[in-house]
Amino acid sequence: MSKILFLVMIGFLFSQEFLDRLIIPIYYQVDFSSGYDSNIFLFSENDLEKKELGSASLRNIKYYDSDYYCPAFKLFYSPVLLNQYETNFIFKFQNKFYRTFNQKNTFSVNSKFEIKFGSYQWLKFGYNYSPHNYLKQFQDLDVFSKDYFDCTFSSSKTYVNYSFPITKKTWTRVILEISDFFYNEHFTEFDTQFHEFNWFFSHKWDKNLRYSLNISVGKGNNSTHLNGLLSSEYDRSYHSGNLKISRSMYNIRFLNLNRFYILFSTDYRNYLSEAIDDPLHSGRFHYDYQLYTSITKKLNSNYSLNLFMKLNKRYTISEFDWVQDLKSFNKFEMGIKFTFNGVYNIYR
């Protein structure tokens, strides 16, 4: 009997110790951003002209620009699962609301688990999901009709990355990602699984200045190609590449700012179709240039303010002028974001 009581006590103590590892303060972050987007549908100049003329494909779209509002909530939970290593669970929930066209509203959820093995040495696993994303209206190639239908899709991404130091001031991260894009029933011919490899570098020039470089290559596989539908006859698969260069300045005293950030990126996409009767994709590729800049000011230990601006230009190259005109666009975005960082202590 005494042995049984001893084992019960040992089990109780062990379980209590384990619970103490789990019952810890939970950190959270609340963001609210508001901004203006000059081209929420990524309209080309031709699309904008059609809108002015009252095109049937744009009949329910009154405005091509909009202000938007974006609340977000992030949780940081760091239980002591391993004695030697830091472990974190991170969850983020975000909505984006467009005032002029509510079908464009989106919701996304992101989750991540990470383990820290040492300074700048992390292993991370993540999953992101967005169930509804609106593009615009198109004709369904499998329906013999002149009607236009809403084109929407869901997106998900699974990834793993590992970061480690190279020198005292330089560290790197390698990232493997798999993304899935599933379109609604009228446009399943565009369903795609995208595989991407990223290689990221960060260098600390001094205590207030950092530079970073990101290089990525990927391939999008058109998963519904030749699935029996007429519209799936053409292959929408593509190769892609990306280059990002950024500069971060911290503690800028003469401007009384905590951070100034600027990023330039170039995305490249090359469609693999060589079908003569597929002029929209055959031989087509594009460059997507983006310039992003932001400034951040901490108001106190909990609150911060961020102002940002983004310029985006896509230049499409094709044998057909109408394709170049159709798939090229310009976009401008600017906004402001408020952030609150807090902690919930379960022992209170």
Image: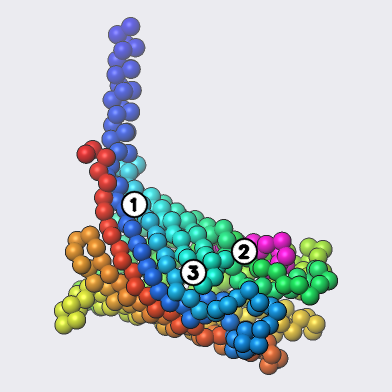
**Bounds of the magenta segment:** 177-190
The answer to whether 76 appears left or right of 37 in the picture is: left
Residue for badge 2: 153
Cα gap from disc 2 to disc 3, whole angstroms: 17 Å
In this view, 183 is above or below 8? below
Per the image, label 2 sits on a secondary structure element best described as: strand
Circle on res. 180: none
Decide whether residue 288 is among the magenta residues.
no
Q: Residues within 10 Å of mark 3 (few under 14, many from 20)?
A: many
Give the residue type that dot 2 points to: Phe
Q: Quadrant of residue 132?
A: bottom right
* Nearest the eye: 183 or 95: 95
Report the residue at 33% width, 17% height from top.
Answer: 8
Residue carrying label 1: 76
| Residue drawn 50% across the image and 59% down it | 107
Q: Residue at x 21, y 76 (%)?
A: 257
Percent coordinates x, y for residue 332 in the rendering: 45, 82
| Residue under pointer 3 | 98
